[in-house]
Image: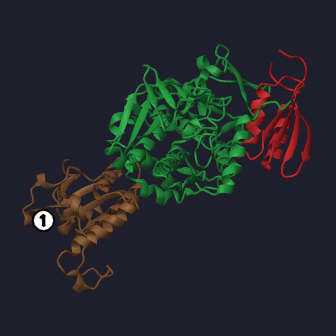
Chain colours: A brown, B green, C red
């Protein structure tokens, strides 16, 4: 994992608009869009940072990145009554259905999207507070993570640019 | 067992092999199909990088990877150039004498930039179409250039990457401005086309920019010969231009294996159906990318989109679903115009290029593509490209297929005397 | 090498971008002074392009004939670097 990021907008030699995406959720229907926005912004030349906090850490944890699920309860977007969603096994089924659809549309997997984001220069930052709370060691994080930072640093990552909270 | 052989491990060949390995995964595992990729080189270069190497000093190593690293499991890579294709016996012979039988063949052997085809050109000019090393020579020469006339010429058509000559001009202009010696340098652009860029709407965007930046343009300049001693370049039309530094896009032709196998037209390109990518008059043989005779841009994007069609069509033939698709001619050629701006020359067979406004976003999109090229070759990012390019493959229509066969045959015979 | 003037027909119908004019150039490259090149094209731009080229290069535009669904453009090679 890289050293703590020094913020440089002039790094590329050109002024580019910053884009900070704060991801606090860990279900696939939240993580995938976060990466789509990040990579799109990067292709357009913006300096993109992603900050993973709370359940967002699932996307950068080696143990969970390959098996993100689709929430089946309390998910107003999913066309299924909450009570059905509570039945054991529903989460797994909903996830399988989404994964099936995604595969059919040949959607890149989350790990592929992470690699593409890195290719395009997106920086990934883990939340120090969450890690302390959950007792997550640095070694548990995927190698693509650039560093572990706190809230203050995180906010300055978005300075002068756009902040999107998921 | 259905054997698919792909010849040529460039952009199109590599991508086609990967797509086939992915779509035929189960068949390959079960020993019912095989995908073999026959390629000459151990390394795979990202050719658009040549412009950055030549005019921005980029490190050539940055744009090269090991071909093996780029291939999916399931692709049998044979690093041994193909020297003969025999459609009668459905076999491919390699340099070391190995003979591969095929049920389906994909010819992805590209186009060869060859300065030796114009007298004096190899000795008198530099170019960025023959590879990273030759491109690097341009950069080294530019460092020592203190003033004089720099001529950028197109010495043959078609050539790889239609916007590249114009990009070279824009980048040279920018380079000399950065060096602070632009006023000591005259930049001239010689093109055989009727205008600074062949497509009219794009030319209308490029021409004023050339004019504003003091670029001298000579149109209808068909390069005939170069005098390396006198530093002169001559056109068929009788014009002459002096130069201190000549950067010329060489004439191109098809690969030796195509020519030696009798599959090429007068320029060594393979007569190909512009929709299905089937080779005219041959069963089970396809051709993609720069190697075809189709009058569409010779570019990686085209090879990529055609690969998707070919992989689909071959799988359809193997699985006997017979739902062939055809390529709609979509091109997307980025042209950097300096000052961190770019335009896209974007068209299909049915609609010619449209007007474009240079923008920084397009500049970054071009650069972004270069960053994800290697990953894109394994096929995992297709959905993203689908979103960007829109629908580029359509189900085949019987009428248009037979009509296109006639046109493609005529195009192949074009130029021959009638009686 | 033949000294008899040749009449070459270049069929560029259905060709596009930039098609006909480059097909003409191919024929011009191997032509001799006095040869006639007859270009068949469906691309409407061919007329203007060939006319402009003939004017600039000093070659002679003989005729443009509109046929059913295509055009025939006849050029005589009167100027070419030997």
Q: In the visual, does B360 lie left or right of B223?
A: left
Of residue C51 and residue A107, the one placed in the foreground of this image is A107
Q: Quadrant of residue B161?
A: top right
Chain that bears disc 1 = A
Q: Is residue B103 left or right of residue B157?
A: left
Nearer to us in this view, B241 or B109:
B109
Q: Residue placed at 26% from the left, 67% from the top?
A: A23
Q: Which residue, given by chain and number where applicable, does mark 1 sit on?
A: A129
Q: Position of residue A54 (x, y in %)?
A: 17, 68
* Above or below, comparing residue B403 to residue A65 in the picture: above
Quadrant where the N terminus of chain B is found in the figure: top left
Left or right placement of residue B70 versus residue B134 in this view: left
Indicate whether A34 appears above or below A146: below
Query: Label 1: how many residues lie within 10 Å, few (<14), some (14-19) or many (20+)?
Result: some
Q: Is residue C17 visible?
A: no
Residue A140 sits above or below residue B101 on the image = below
Q: Find residue C50 and report its horizontal and vertical position in percent.
A: 82, 40
Task: Pinpoint residue A36: horizontal percent, then vertical percent.
Answer: 36, 62
Q: Position of residue B393 (x, y in %)?
A: 55, 56
* Residue A86 is at least partly visible in this image: yes
Q: How many marks?
A: 1
Q: Quadrant of the C terminus of chain B?
A: top right
Viewer-side residue, B9 vs B134: B9
Quick one: SS at disc 1? helix
Q: Position of B20 compared to B310: left or right? A: left
């Amino acid at each position: 994992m890289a050293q703590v990021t020094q913020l440089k907008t002039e790094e590329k030699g050109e002024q580019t608009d910053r884009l900070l995406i704060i991801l606090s959720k860990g279900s696939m229907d939240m993580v995938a869009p976060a990466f789509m926005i990040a990579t799109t912004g990067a292709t357009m030349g913006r300096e993109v940072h992603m900050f993973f906090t709370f359940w967002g850490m699932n996307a950068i944890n080696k143990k969970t990145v390959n098996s993100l699920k689709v929430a089946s309860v309390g998910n107003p977007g999913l066309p299924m009554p909450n009570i059905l969603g509570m039945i054991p096994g529903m989460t797994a089924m909903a996830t399988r259905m989404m994964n099936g659809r995604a595969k059919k549309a040949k959607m890149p997997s989350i790990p592929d999207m992470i690699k593409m984001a890195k290719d395009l220069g997106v920086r990934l930052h883990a939340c120090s507070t969450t890690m302390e709370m959950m007792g997550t060691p640095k070694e548990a994080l995927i190698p693509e993570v650039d560093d572990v930072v706190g809230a203050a640093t995180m906010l300055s990552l978005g300075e002068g640019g756009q902040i999107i909270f998921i | 067992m259905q054997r698919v052989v792909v010849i040529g491990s460039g952009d199109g060949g590599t991508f086609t092999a990967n797509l086939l390995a992915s779509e035929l995964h189960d068949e390959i595992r079960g020993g019912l199909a095989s995908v073999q990729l026959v390629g000459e080189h151990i390394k795979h270069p990202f050719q658009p990088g040549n412009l950055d190497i030549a005019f921005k000093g980029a490190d050539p190593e940055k744009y090269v990877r090991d071909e093996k690293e780029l291939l999916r499991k399931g692709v049998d890579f044979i690093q041994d150039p193909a020297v003969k294709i025999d459609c009668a016996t459905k076999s491919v012979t390699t340099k070391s004498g190995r003979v591969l039988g095929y049920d389906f063949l994909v010819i992805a052997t590209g186009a060869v930039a060859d300065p030796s085809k114009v007298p004096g050109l190899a000795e008198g000019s530099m170019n960025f179409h023959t590879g990273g090393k030759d491109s690097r020579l341009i950069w080294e020469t530019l460092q020592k250039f203190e003033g004089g006339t720099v001529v950028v010429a197109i010495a043959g058509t078609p050539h790889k990457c239609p916007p590249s000559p114009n990009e070279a001009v824009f980048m040279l202009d920018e380079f000399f401005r950065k060096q602070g010696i632009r006023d000591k340098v005259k930049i001239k652009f010689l093109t055989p086309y009727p205008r600074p860029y062949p497509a009219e709407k794009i030319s209308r965007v490029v021409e004023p920019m050339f004019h504003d930046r003091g670029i001298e343009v000579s149109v209808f300049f068909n390069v005939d010969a170069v005098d390396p001693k006198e530093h002169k370049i001559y056109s068929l039309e009788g014009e002459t231009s002096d130069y201190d530094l000549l950067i010329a896009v060489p004439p191109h032709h098809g690969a030796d294996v195509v020519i030696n196998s009798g599959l090429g037209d007068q320029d060594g390109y393979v007569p190909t159906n512009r929709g299905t990518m089937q080779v005219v008059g041959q069963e089970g043989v396809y051709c993609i990318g720069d190697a075809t005779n189709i009058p569409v841009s010779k570019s990686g994007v085209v090879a990529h989109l055609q690969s998707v069609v070919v992989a689909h069509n071959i799988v359809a033939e193997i699985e006997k679903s017979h739902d062939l698709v055809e390529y709609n001619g979509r091109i997307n050629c980025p042209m950097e115009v300096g000052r961190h701006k770019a335009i896209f020359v974007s068209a299909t067979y049915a609609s010619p290029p449209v007007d474009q406004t240079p923008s920084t976003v397009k500049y970054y999109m071009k650069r972004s593509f270069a960053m994800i090229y290697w990953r894109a070759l394994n096929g995992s990012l297709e959905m993203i490209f689908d979103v960007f390019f829109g629908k580029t493959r359509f189900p085949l229509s019987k009428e248009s297929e037979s009509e296109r066969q006639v046109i493609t045959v005529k195009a192949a015979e074009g130029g021959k005397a009638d009686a | 090498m033949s000294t008899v003037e040749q009449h070459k027909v270049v069929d560029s119908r259905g060709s596009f971008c930039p098609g006909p004019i480059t097909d003409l150039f191919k024929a011009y490259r191997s032509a001799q002074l006095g040869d006639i090149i007859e270009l068949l094209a469906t691309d409407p731009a061919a007329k203007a392009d060939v006319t402009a080229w003939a004017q600039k290069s000093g070659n002679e535009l003989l005729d443009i004939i509109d046929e059913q669904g295509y055009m025939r453009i006849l050029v005589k090679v009167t100027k070419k670097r030997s």
